[in-house]
Amino acid sequence: MVETGVKELRLPVEADTVEFGRRLGCLLRAGDLVLLSGPLGAGKTALTRGIAEGLGVKGRVSSPTFVIAREHRAGERGVALVHVDAYRLGGHLDELDDLDLDTELVDAAVVVEWGEGVAERLSEDHLLIRLTRLDDDVRVAELHPHGTWTTRQLP
């Protein structure tokens, strides 16, 4: 996997995290894979809410921790969102396979929270976003593009 062009964004308040997600969601298309990494409270779900807004999908976005994966139907843009929380999978790749996400990647954009180290194998072409939360509650997003993402415009 090739990784070039790491980009870093400072997100001072939650609204900035959601807005960054919205801009990213406007760029996503069916087949895109976005992996989110970061500790609890880093902003993974807030970012995904923004992505959903940018995609224009239907349904309220919340953490899928207890259901592991939620599908949000496509809106006017025609791209559905599959939102996965890999935290409870605990690195069990068989359970990830059971979700059949490689099939979902044909018709939907897939966002996997806690996806680093688990979901990269779904596609060489993915965007890894590492979120950290600083002591002053500012979030920092590091964008790590892989594969074709290295040539795409990032928000």
Image: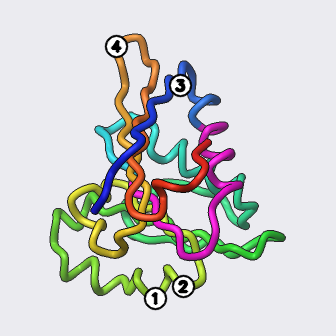
* Distance from Cα at disc 2 to Cα at disc 4: 40 Å
Report x, y in % for residue 23: 68, 45
| Horizontal side, residue 30 vs residue 86: left or right | right
The image quarter containing residue 28 is bottom right
Q: Which residue is mark 4?
A: 135
153 magenta-colored = no
User: Which x, y percent locates residue 25?
Assistant: 65, 54
Question: Which callout, 1 or 3, points at the residue further toward the start of the chain?
Answer: 3
* Sequence-earlier tag: 2 or 4: 2
- Which residue is outermost to the top? 136
Mark 4 lies on a secondary structure that is: loop
Query: Would you identify the image quadrant in which residue 73 lies?
Result: bottom right
Mark 3–mark 2 CB contact (< 8 Å): no
Q: Nearer the viewer, mark 2 or mark 4?
A: 2
Q: Are marks 1 and 2 in contact (CB under 8 Å)?
A: yes
Q: Residue at x 54, y 44 (%)?
A: 47
> Quick one: label 2, few (<14), some, or many (20+) residues within 10 Å?
few
Which contiguous range is marked in magenta?
Answer: 18-35
Instruction: Give whichever of discs 3 and 2 has the lower sequence position.
Output: 3
**Residue type indicated by callout 2:** Val
Which residue in the protein does label 2 denote?
Answer: 106
Q: Which residue is mark 1?
A: 103
Q: Give the distance between the C-alpha atoms of the residues marked 4 and 1, in whole angstroms.
A: 40 Å
- Give the CA distance from mark 4 to mark 3: 13 Å
Which label number is shown at residue 11?
3
User: How many C-alpha atoms fall within 10 Å of the one at disc 4: few (<14), some, or many (≥20)?
Assistant: few
11 above or below 150?
above
Q: Residue placed at 42% from the left, 27% from the top? A: 140
Q: Rounded to the nearest whole Å, what is the CA distance between mark 1 and mark 2?
A: 6 Å
Callout 2: helix, strand or loop? helix
